[in-house]
Image (tube, rainbow, N blue to C red):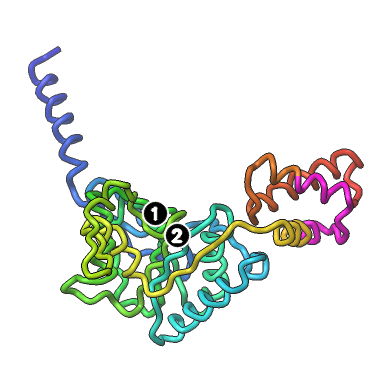
Amino acid sequence: MKKSDKLFERVNRLLDRLEQFLPVSCSEPDWRASAAFRWRKRGNTGLIEAVVHPHRIGLAALQGIDVQKQRIDLNTRQFVQGLPANNVLLTGARGTGKSSLIKALLSQYAPAGLRLIEVEKHHLVDLHDIVDKIYQRPERFILFCDDLSFETDEPGYKALKVVLDGSIATVSDNVLIYATSNRRHMVPEFMRDNFDTRHIDGEVHPSEAIEERISLSERFGLWLSFYPFDQDQYLDVVRYWLADFGITTMTAQARAEALQWSIERGSRSGRVAWQFVRDWVGRQKSSDGGRKS
């Protein structure tokens, strides 16, 4: 290989390495093309990308969580109308509709200008950059953080705390944060933290470690708790989804199989009910040549 060729190859490799540090040219997203977006990183540059085929679900499809649905719907309606509203933390049992409820609210209020930007946990450090990109927009934005849990020293944990409350810069009034977690205190709690709890004149004073663990959840103005379904709630959801597939009557066999399905899964929830109905309807239609049950 010629000396000039070697030099050319080395220059190309150097340019390839430098390219990842150069800013990415990213155009403004088309806010009318979609209601759902994601925050993405390319190199050191963040950008908001439209979700071409977002998951669409209606509020009516979410059964067994009427109280939670009513409260978050009212909060979201206030927000879309430009009225004061709160950041929301949805916590509790898996599969009970926490994430689906937020997606259903987007479907409900997108025509009124609501937009959703999903932010993954490792991108929470970019929250201020995201807000800077949208604070002058006329739309109303929910920053959606799904299935959160942290270690105390994670940078995303501290960034979320600052954005929720405590930053020198005020968060724009066209932005709210809706987050889901399987536990209200999103940081692990350890028995050793209780050893520093003090008792003064009959009063209990939690240790600083415990105070730190609950400080993040306290920054959300609205807490919504979700609980495992009892048997009747679970079967009601099964009936709803059977009807959605055109099966208006739940037979004794379907009921027995639905209960067995929940036992095998170790859970009664809307997600488990939906999974059972898809399996059951598929098997019925396969065995009867496609005729309705």
Dot 1 surroundings within 10 Å: few (below 14), some, or many (20 or more)? some
Q: Is residue 97 toward the left or the right of residue 31 in the image?
A: right
Outermost residue on the front side: it is 201
Main secondary structure type of the part rendered in magenta:
helix
Q: Are marks 2 and 1 in contact (CB under 8 Å)?
A: yes
**Coordinates of residue 140 in the picture (x, y in percent):** 41, 76
Answer with the quarter of the image where residue 237 lies. Answer: bottom right
Magenta part of the chain: 242-259
User: From what the image shows, is residue 171 above or below residue 276?
Assistant: below
Q: Is residue 247 toward the left or the right of residue 183 in the image?
A: right
Amino acid at the residue labelled 2: Thr
Q: Which residue is mark 2?
A: 180
Q: Residue at x 31, y 62 (%)?
A: 214
Tell me which label, 2 or 1, sits earlier in the chain: 1
User: Does the segment drawn in magenta span residue 67?
Assistant: no
Amino acid at the residue labelled 1: Leu
Label 1 SS: loop
Q: Residue at x 36, y 70 (%)?
A: 220
**Coordinates of residue 69 in the picture (x, y in percent):** 57, 72
Q: Which mark is residue 148?
A: 1
Q: Residue at x 75, y 50 (%)?
A: 277
Nearer to me, 238 or 7: 238
**Coordinates of residue 49 in the picture (x, y in percent):** 39, 57
